[in-house]
Every structure is written in structure tokens, then in C-alpha cells.
Image (cartoon, grey):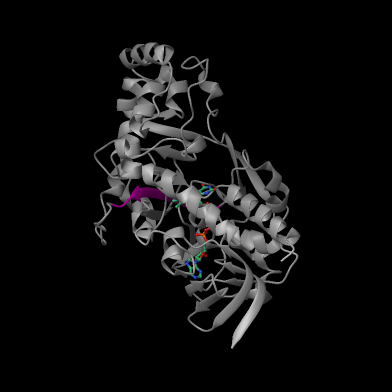
Amino acid sequence: MTQHTDVLILGGGISGCTAARFLRRPWLILERDNVLGGLSNQYQSQKYWFDFGGHYFHFQHSPAIFPHITGVTPFRLYRRRSRVWMFESLIPFPLQSHLDFLPPHYRQKITSELAEAGSTDKATLATQLNSRFGPTLYQLFFLPFLSKYYRRDLNELVPGLERGSIPPPASSQGQEKPEQTEQGYNPEFYYPAGGLRLFWRHYTSSLMPRVHLNEPVMAVDLARRRVETSRRTYGFTHLINTIPLPHFLSMLRGFRHDPELPRQLRHTTTRVTNLVLSQRRRRFHWVYLPARDHPYYRMGYYPAASVCKAYLEQTLPEHNALGDSEPDYSGLLRQLGVIKDPDEIVHVSHRDIPIGYVLFDALWFRKVPATIKRLRQQGVFSIGRYGGWTYSSMAADALAAMESALLINRDKA
Ligand SMILES: Cc1cc2nc3c(=O)[nH]c(=O)nc-3n(C[C@H](O)[C@H](O)[C@H](O)COP(=O)(O)OP(=O)(O)OC[C@H]3O[C@@H](n4cnc5c(N)ncnc54)[C@H](O)[C@@H]3O)c2cc1C
């Protein structure tokens, strides 16, 4: 028998749950996992709970959702202390504002190249960064760092949607004092005082009666307004999708699209190596790792933990999962001054995130916005970082979910 609901929500991460919290019409969430929260919740490894890599709330570009999120449980504000590990030292991020920390030869070259940087060549991510920051800073930091982060030739990627993640040079470029370190993108962030798991418990407590857990969506028929799961068939009037767009499109009937598209959409796969350490030796929040001699691109400490927890992030090669073999992270942690002795590593847990970051290539610009728009014309809000197939934050996803819910509330259908 088909169960009908006005609004069917596919996926119960921050996008699906925020939409549900704002809807004023009957709704139902279908979630594949046995908990809500998606990537912004935590998972358990032995007696420890870990985030899926650094997960901090940034409200800089989504202030309208701030009271809704932070009203649920106490949050702490952190002023970002991020660093770049280079020349055997921890240089404040972003590099272009801290040239005093570089050897004089580099400092002079970069300063003059930044002063000369004129119009920006936007043909590819490589040419854009080269012209915006100059060849020296590009070769020193952006090229090695982003090559590990994206694991793609930067000439295959198109700029424009990395948004605030690469801060553009300011007019005072290169002259800032060390104490003005934390400008650039997201200079501050918020994190639940009791951790993400506590946040999720409060955020979803009122939703639970209308959530179906352990119920993966398997087929969507837009013509008949039906969704099939492993257990039954649901009818809907409005659909909110937060499942990754390629998966959603490949299970979609009654919607015309290029059948090759799901396979053509590019993304990274991220491996997070979570650690419990016996003590905290460094005060930074996270450090970017451009060096080419290991695959990790970022290491950081988790905030608000009663024991010292840290993470390392790497992007896995495209068609070649690393299996269980792991590069020498303990040597790297020693280099960074995070540990003095491998015995300080109390526990290790690896987690692979099959879709970590969407990659923006020419095809993305040709196909994705148009597909999302056409879905919308058929009453489907495909939202969130993965449903919308974009680069976004938890706060931006929550805001987009709120806006979608408000539109559906007003809809006459
Ligand atoms: C390594 C990493 C670090 C990040 N760091 C930050 C950060 O510091 N700050 C920040 O703001 N953002 C960060 N993000 C981004 C953040 O994780 C996302 O913006 C956010 O979690 C997306 O939420 P969502 O609800 O749209 O998707 P998800 O959290 O992915 O939720 C989608 C839900 O759909 C469910 N689902 C999938 N398939 C099916 C199916 N077939 N049937 C039913 N349910 C299904 C999933 O189980 C999941 O619960 C980071 C992301 C990564 C990968």
C-alpha cells in the first residue's frame, strides 16, 4: 500500500532536518542510516566519538540561520588559528598576508608579483590562481596544496565556486602584522559546546516521530509522484532531495536528462584519520600541509573534547582506494610537533567519505545549474552540498533548506 505525504524528504542530514523543522505541512524523512545527522554528526570507534573531519559552523555568509542553529544547544565561538606548514615552521594562514614569515627571497618576489597582478585569467583554476597570486606563490603553495586536495590537474578545474575557500589578495597584501593573523575566509567559527552529537540529539528530538530510519530510497518516479524504498512505496506532492545528485539522478524516472550525467559528475573521496592523543602540544586549530612527500592536506584538533582528539585528511586517488595501508602519519605528527613519541597516539580510526568535495569542471557549469532548475520546475528541491552538487557549508545548507521549506509552505499545491 502506498503511504501518501505532502512533503517527502530524502536524507536526514542538516539539510533534510532543517527543512523539516521549518515545514508547516505534513512531511516525512526517509533516511538510509540508523541515525540522523549525515556527515555533520559523529560516529563511534571503540569508546570514542569522532566527527567526520573538521566540522565547524561558519555563519559569515549565512547569518539568517545563526539564531536557529545556535538556539538549540550552547555553542562556543572560536577565533580561527590556522597555519601552513612550510619551511619547517607554522606560518599563519593565509600566506599572502604573512609574507614576513617567508625567506626574504620569496617575500620580495611574491610582493612584487602581487603588486603587478592585474586582471584575472579565469580560464582554469590553474590560470586564475597564477594570475591572481603570481607564479611564485602559486608554485609554492596553491599548486602543491590543491593538487593533493583535489587530486586533479588544476587545468581541468574551473574557478568560481570554491567561493571563500581561497581568500583573494587584499590591498594591503603582504604588509599585515603577525597579530592580524586571522583575517581571510571564515576568521571565526562556532562549535557546539557539548559536541556535534549533543547538538543533533536536541536538533532532532521533535522530529523523530516522522522519521523513517534504515530506509534507503531505491527509486523515484516523478511522473507518478512515487518513491520506493526497501520497505514500501510513498506518494508525495513536494519532494526535497538531499541524496547526492548523481545517485538521485540514477534512480529517477519520469525526468528527462542525459543518462551519462550521473557518471560524468566529478567529486573527491576523502579519508579522515581520526586520532586520540595523550596530550595537546600545539595551540593551532588546523594546519594546511602542501608538502608533496605525503598525501595529507590538512591536520587539525577537534574542539570541545574532554580528551585530545585530532584528525588528518587526505583525498584518495580516483580509481585506487588505498585499502588499509596508511602512510606514515606518526612521522608527520612528530615533524609538526603534535607528538614527541608515537606512544602519544592512544587510538586511531579511519573513515572514508565516498563523496567529499564536488569538483567544478566545464561540464558542471554546463549541466548542473540547468538540471537543478528543471528539477525545481517539477516540484523537486534538490538541495544541500550533495543534493545541490555544490560547494557549501553546514550553515549555508541549513539556510537553503529553510528557504526551500518556506517556499513549500507558501505553495498552493
Ligand atoms: C571532510 C569534510 C569536512 C567538512 N568540513 C566542514 C566544516 O568545517 N564546516 C562546514 O560547515 N561544513 C563542512 N563540510 C561540509 C558539510 O559536511 C556539508 O555541507 C553538510 O554535512 C551537508 O549536509 P546535507 O544534509 O546536505 O548532506 P549529508 O550530511 O550528506 O546528509 C545526506 C543524508 O542522506 C542520506 N542518504 C544518502 N543516500 C540515501 C538514500 N539512498 N536513501 C535515504 N537516505 C540517503 C545520508 O545517509 C545522509 O544522512 C565538510 C565536508 C567534508 C567532506
Quadrant of res 366: top left
Residue 269 drawn at (x, y percent): 36, 54
Q: Position of residue 322 (x, y in %)?
A: 25, 57
- Whether residue 335 can be seen here: no
User: Residue at 43% across / 49% down in the picture?
Assistant: 367
Check the image and report above or below for 345 versus 185: below
The secondary structure making up most of the magenta span is strand
Task: Give the side of residue 332 with respect to residue 192, left or right.
Answer: left
Image quadrant in which the N terminus is located: bottom right
- Say if the magenta span includes residue 306: yes
Counting labels gives 0
Q: Is residue 256 magenta?
A: no
Of residue 39 and residue 21, the one placed in the foreground of this image is 21
The boundaries of the magenta stretch are 305-316
Could you say which is closer to the camera, residue 125 or residue 280?
125
Image quarter of residue 125? top left
One can see residue 212 in this view: yes
Q: Residue at x 39, y 54 (%)?
A: 272
Q: Residue at x 35, y 43 (%)?
A: 149
* Front residue of this view, candidates 152 and 190: 152
Task: Tell which residue pokes out farthest to the bottom in this image.
Answer: 1
| Left or right of 397, for residue 298 | left
Q: Position of residue 195 (x, y in %)?
A: 59, 56
Quadrant holding the C terminus: bottom right
